[in-house]
Image (cartoon, rainbow, N blue to C red):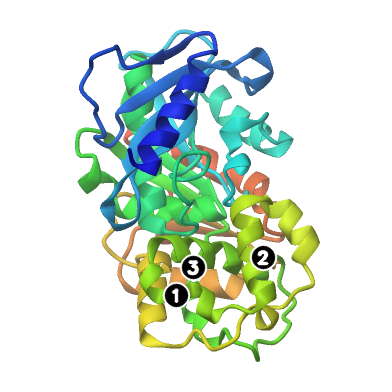
Amino acid sequence: MSKRLCRTLVGLSASALVALTVAAPAGAEPNDAPGAVVSQELLGPDRVTPGAVSATKVTYWSTGPKDAPMTSTGVVYRPEGAPPEGGWPVISYAHGTVGVADQCAPSSSVPLERTATHLGHWLEQGYAVVTTDYVGLGTPGVHPYLDGRSAAHSVVDMVRAARAVDDDLSSAWVAMGQSQGGQATMFTASLATAYAPELDYRGAVATGVPSNIENLLPLGGPAFPALPLKGTTVYIANVLDGLRASRPDIDIDSYLTPLGKTILDDVENNMCYTEARTKYGTVTLGQVLTKSLDNPVFMEAARDLLTVPTAGYDRPFFIGQGLSDIDVPAPLTLKFAADLTANGVDFAFHTYPTDHLGTVPASVPDSTPFVAALFSGQRPCTGSLC
């Protein structure tokens, strides 16, 4: 029996002890099609975010690195009141960096206050909100951090799974995310209509989008300077940990100092992002690496994971960036926006005098009418129209 199947069966056995958990009937054929539901569980009142009448945790199949089937978990939040004709429009929300260890999965705990407030805003607007954990985060396998395509698949398949457990959800949906979730949202925007043509994808809202990271990685090595950035070493450790699992041919450990190996082992097994940043916040990237990352094999793999598309979008989207953001520095996003503009992409771009986390609430007055226009079928404010 494979490790993945074994861990899945153990998880299902545990969840069967929880009231209102529904799994496939005995004797049913296994179904690992993207979006297929493995189990569902109605969460208790303490897990229901403001503006929702219920929260249902689902385990579902999606597509991970190298297009391999993997499972993900997520939560379906149903808004108050009766659904409109055609069902509740859906926002598929992609969370920011929490870590890569299984215990860091957002669906495993009460939402952070700032997240609950943000999701509550969209529920109060009359949208169902569904939130993926991404593949490998709380489910079998290592979470492929910042693997944009894998994350996008999780975001799309969360909509499929949510509609399978709630008949009152519309096929019309919008992708939304912050930080790691902002990158996931941009990848989602680039592939949503082709990956799930049966759904009615309308557009996206992304804030704090990590972009152009692949252009900085060639600088990575023992001589990498200490820069006034926040969490860089832990972010890169998460990336390297995902690559270590998905690309064993690269031999990531050969790039690492003993301290670097310890950090990767900790983030994979023991620590969520906040704890890792507290413990390793003063460690520089140069202390983690024994040699330069600038070689063709490593860089090809990194670009496959990290490079956010700058063309090929078929629906409008919104990007918000904090000008004092030291997690995702504004110059990187400004370059991304310039590349999109040069390629004739239809999008709205807003900057705010705030930091990384502050960009989310700061953008709400602009993103709220943008999303409303997407769902109403009107043209949102983009480009020179804004």
Q: Say which residue label 2 marks.
A: 263
The reply, left or right, for residue 7 in relation to residue 163 is right
For the view shown, which residue lies furthest in the bottom direction? 223
For the residues labelled 1 and 2, the Cα–Cα distance comes to 16 Å
As displayed, is residue 376 above or below residue 22?
below
3 and 2 marks in contact (CB < 8 Å): no
Mark on residue 379? none
Which residue is at a point 41% across and 32% down the rendered structure image?
Answer: 8
Which residue is at a point 55% across and 44% down the rendered structure image?
Answer: 95
Q: Is residue 216 visible?
A: no
Q: Nearer the viewer, residue 199 or 344?
A: 199
Local packing at callout 3 (Cα closer than 10 Å; few below 14, some 14-19, many 20+) is many
Which residue is at a point 46% across and 45% down the rendered structure image?
Answer: 136
For the residues labelled 1 and 3, the Cα–Cα distance comes to 25 Å
Q: Say which residue label 1 marks.
A: 251
Mark 3 or mark 2, whichever is nearer to me:
2
The image quarter in which residue 299 lies: bottom left
Q: Earlier in the sequence, mark 3 or mark 2?
A: 3
Q: Say which residue label 3 marks.
A: 211
Q: Which of 334 and 231 is in front in this view?
A: 231
Q: Which amino acid does label 1 sit on?
A: Asp
Q: Earlier in the sequence, mark 1 or mark 3?
A: 3
